[in-house]
Image (cartoon, helix red, strand yellow):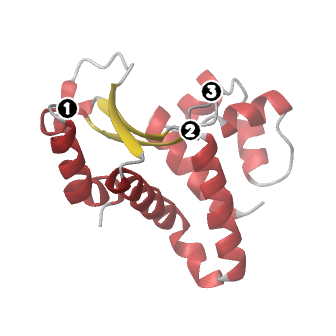
Amino acid sequence: MHQMYIDILIDAIIEQFETEENFYTDYLQTSKENWDNWKKGRINLTSEEMQKVKNLFSDYEWMLTQKILRQTILFPEKRNIAVSEYKRLKTLIAKKWLQSGAGMAELIPSKTNREEKNQAFIDLKVTVSYGEWGFDDIVTFRLPATLQGQLEGSKVELLDWVNENLMGTYVGE
């Protein structure tokens, strides 16, 4: 199993579930032993479990992970930066979609039960719609809820924020 795949997957898990343990116990409903053995390539997950893993990503994000993995095969020097490259490209794609007018940005409040607002998150979803149900391309970004005030308002303000701040906030560059 490609370690880069596991690295991208773990990053998505931490982003969405805070810990691997929350993911494999609450969502995947498997043991630590099974999870660790799967990560090491010793066992296979069930079809249902693999679908849950894939559901961490939109269809477009899943396709992007596959392209990143292929790049790490062709260019071994990219293996150490697979996660940051995935995040950078996802951000670049969202910006291009929005700048071209094809993409639509939407803020989605987090469904967490956290009492502390500074620990809560909001999701920024950027979508390209093709007018056919189930075929939209979507990329999502989990951002600190403290940014919500900067992001709310007009579409122009949201686009400006994405152009100026998404890369630094999401990727850390």
Q: Mark 3 packing: few (<14 Cα in 10 Å), some, or many (20+)? A: few
| Residue depicted at 20% across the width and 32% down the height | 118
Farthest front residue in view: 131
Residue 16: mark in rendering: none
In this rendering, the label closer to the viewer, 3 or 1? 3
Say which residue label 3 marks. 133
Q: CA distance from mark 2 to mark 1?
A: 36 Å
- Tell me the SS state at disc 1: helix
In this rendering, the label closer to the viewer, 2 or 1? 2
Q: Quadrant of residue 2?
A: bottom right
Q: Position of residue 5 (x, y in %)?
A: 66, 58
| Residue depicted at 60% across the width and 57% down the height | 64
| Residue depicted at 56% across the width and 32% down the height | 131
Name above or below for residue 63 compared with residue 84. Answer: above
Residue 130: mark in rendering: 2
Q: CA distance from mark 3 to mark 2?
A: 8 Å
Q: Is 16 on the left-hand or right-hand side of 150?
A: right
The quadrant in which the C terminus is found is bottom left
Residue 118: mark in rendering: 1
Count of numbered badges drawn on the protein: 3
